[in-house]
Image (tube, rainbow, N blue to C red):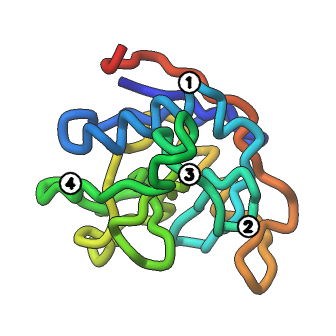
Amino acid sequence: MAVVLETSLGDIVIDLHTEEAPNACLNFLKLCTVKYYNNCLFHSVQKDFIAQTGDPSGTGKGGQCIWNVIDSKKSRFFSSEIHPKLSHNKIGVVSMACLDGDKDKLGSQFFITLTDDLQRLDKHFTIIGEVGEGFDVLSKINEAFVDKEDRPMRNIRIRHTIIIEDPFE
């Protein structure tokens, strides 16, 4: 139940919380399966806060869930699965991003925490996993120079995703 993100700065291994957030993890894994995340930019890097990616348009306004990728008649979004025992309390927590701050508008975008002590996010975002390896890569992302809109000055991309284990197959 892990995925490797091969990024332009190195590899990040994400261990998924498939029991606590089954639909969100299914969505994430199946988007990886269809190579949806390949070449996605980290379009927002907020130092000592979060790094966000998962939008193929690179704008931070795009993306869609796997069910919409498969069938365009389905909703672009799905609902949150906020688990009370999971917390944004360390570096490397991986959560689904919400569109327009609506916790029930989850698509393909996700973020990784770049600091600990972000429990204020706990009741607002669905945690899908945590980084198991690649903390050096997170440090490099965190140190990226960004513009006034938090877009890295140098492109940081997910080049490829590799599923190590898919419990939904």
Earlier residue among tags 3 and 1: 1
**Crowding near pointer 4: few (<14 within 10 Å), some, many (20+)?**
some
- C-alpha separation, residue under disc 1 versus residue under disc 4: 25 Å
- Is residue 98 positioned above or below 137 on the image? below
Percent x, y for residue 53? 62, 55
Query: In the rendered view of the protein, which quadrant contains the C terminus?
Result: top left
* Foreground label between 1 and 4: 1
Kind of residue at disc 1: Thr
- Indicate which disc, 4 or 2, sits on the residue closer to the N terminus: 2
SS at mark 2? loop
Q: Which residue is mark 4?
A: 86
- Tag 3 residue: 64
- Disc 2: which residue: 59
Mark 1 residue element: helix
In the image, residue 51 above or below residue 7: below
Q: Is residue 148 left or right of residue 115?
A: right
Q: Name the residue: 52% across, 44% down.
A: 68
Q: Is residue 12 visible?
A: yes
Tell me the element at label 3.
Answer: loop
The answer to which of marks 4 and 3 sits earlier in the sequence is 3
Residue linked to disc 1: 33
> What amino acid is at disc 3?
Gln
Q: Residues within 10 Å of mark 3 (few under 14, many from 20)?
A: many
Q: How far apart are the two marked residues, 4 and 3, measured between alpha carbons?
A: 24 Å
Whichever of callouts 2 and 3 sits on the residue coming sooner in the sequence is: 2
Indicate the amino acid at tag 4.
Leu
Q: Residue furthest front?
A: 73
Marks 4 and 2 in Cβ contact (< 8 Å):
no
Of the residues shown, which amino acid type is indicated by label 2?
Answer: Thr
Q: Residues within 10 Å of mark 2 (few under 14, many from 20)?
A: some
